[in-house]
Image: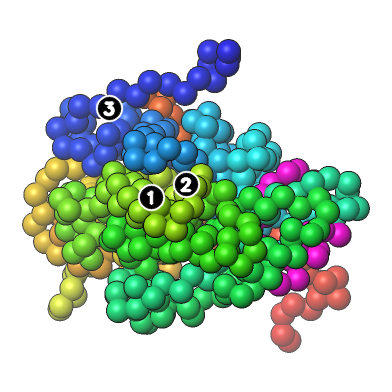
Amino acid sequence: MPHAKLRAPELKPVNYSTTFGEFIGIGPNGNLFVDGCDVQDLAEKYGTPLYIISENQLRHNYRAFRDAFQKYYPETEILFANKSNNGLAIRHIMNQEGAGGDCFGAQEMYMALLAGTNPKSLVLNGSNKQDEELEMAVANGLCINIDAMDELDRIVEIATRLDCDVDIGIRLKLDLEPLRNRTGVAMHGPGTLKQQSDSTKWGMSREQTVEIVNRAKTMPRINLKETHFHLSRMSNDPADFAVMAREMITWSGYIRDNTGWTPPCIDIGGGWTFGKWYGTGPNSQLDGPNAPKPDDYARLCAAAIKEEAEKLGLPLPKLRLEPGRALSGPAGVAVGRVGAVKTGTTKKWVNLDISTNHLSWAAVLDWYYHSVPVKNAGAAPTETVDLVGPLCNSDEIGPHRQMPALARGDFVAFLDAGGYTESSAARYNAQLLPATVLVSGTSAEVITEREQLKDVAGRFRVPSRLLAGSFAP
Ligand SMILES: Cc1ncc(COP(=O)(O)O)c(C=O)c1O
């Protein structure tokens, strides 16, 4: 019987006048609320730029994925992509929910273990794993997804030396022939989904996979556990994910026929979108009432897997998924304060103290498209402005946004900013990294401290020979 406090809580969505999520919306006073907290109060109290995460929204997003896949598929395990938000509190919440995790690199693995995640629910991915990284994974019992021909020997050497067994998977380079002419988001350069996928560094070919499996079968200490693929965020269409899931099974048939080993588990990675019903996003397929939901993904992927497995006479494998953005993204908002408002001949710029350092995928992929004023969040837009940050580049965090009139001191929030913001934040122009506040009901707690000047300046050193005579005569 788990400790009462550790049980994942029941969730009761909040009744907002306008909803941006089950736990994010416009509150009774017209301001933007995250769960039971007024974002205006949070921004004033904790300062800006500020990330705010709704604990209940995060839990809700996880459960929506889990429940959808469990509805259509017998054995499913959701591994949260830790890279989307590395916060220790976030990982603790995922642990409580029963989520596993995808770790990329030694530090993500360390943080997940530090948060007490069950290592057997963690996988280590990576195309260039370091010796100490492999050793940490072997010693702690993670499943390692092999992504290089020499990795197996390195793992065996470590496992033998440490005298322990190790679970391995193989990251595949699927052919994706049926996606030869499908286009989507230019995530990995130009080209169709197949061309983009082929051009990335990840995965082993069919022949390489067969060689690894045949060698692994003869090696001590090695347990073959899964095959892995990550379609990435190239497509927002669930049908493309179903094609990928089917191809995982086609490959399982090929592997069985050539090695005698049938993968008992397929891990179909992340890339699941967080398209929303509100507003009009930059990609028509990403936003609007037809934005794909977990149910759409689950239904189509489960059907494709079952159909292909039956055709090839394969048992249904366990299914693993690694959603990151779809879970953490809509659980967070990022808030900036308005400074200078400037009108030019062709444009109006609203300067904020939040920047592309803090919303780094804003400029590349328009991920944090939805911006709302924090006060009077439902006010009708009256003008088109560019929301810009303070960096010494154009720092466009929200070009061509329809907003009501904004003035110095107002706060602006970017929705769906819980993923890949804090975890990919940068310090360009010696900016300090923002704080993060976790909201649950009416409580708000800092889970990441705001960086201070000492954290930035403190890492620099001046060789003693330069200390005197810094000024030219
Ligand atoms: C192997 C792997 N799994 C999962 C993810 C998570 O992707 P997303 O956040 O789009 O779901 C990534 C993202 O880069 C990844 O590389």
Circle 2 SS class: loop
Mark 3 — residue? 13
Question: Measuring 50% from the left and 41% from the top, which residue is drawn there?
Answer: 77
Of mark 1 and mark 2, the one earlier in the sequence is: 1
Circle 1 SS class: helix
Image x and y of residue 14, in percent? 25, 27
Which amino acid does the dot numbered 2 rest on?
A: Leu
Of badges 2 and 3, nearer the viewer stands: 2
Mark 1 — residue? 306
Which amino acid does the dot numbered 1 rest on?
A: Lys
**Where is 107 relative to 470, above or below?**
above
Question: Measuring 47% from the left and 23% from the top, which residue is drawn there?
Answer: 8
Mark 2 — residue? 316
Q: Is residue 237 magenta?
A: no
> Label 2 vs label 3: CA separation?
35 Å
Q: Is residue 390 toward the left or the right of residue 285 in the image? A: right
Where are the magenta residues, as a range?
139-157
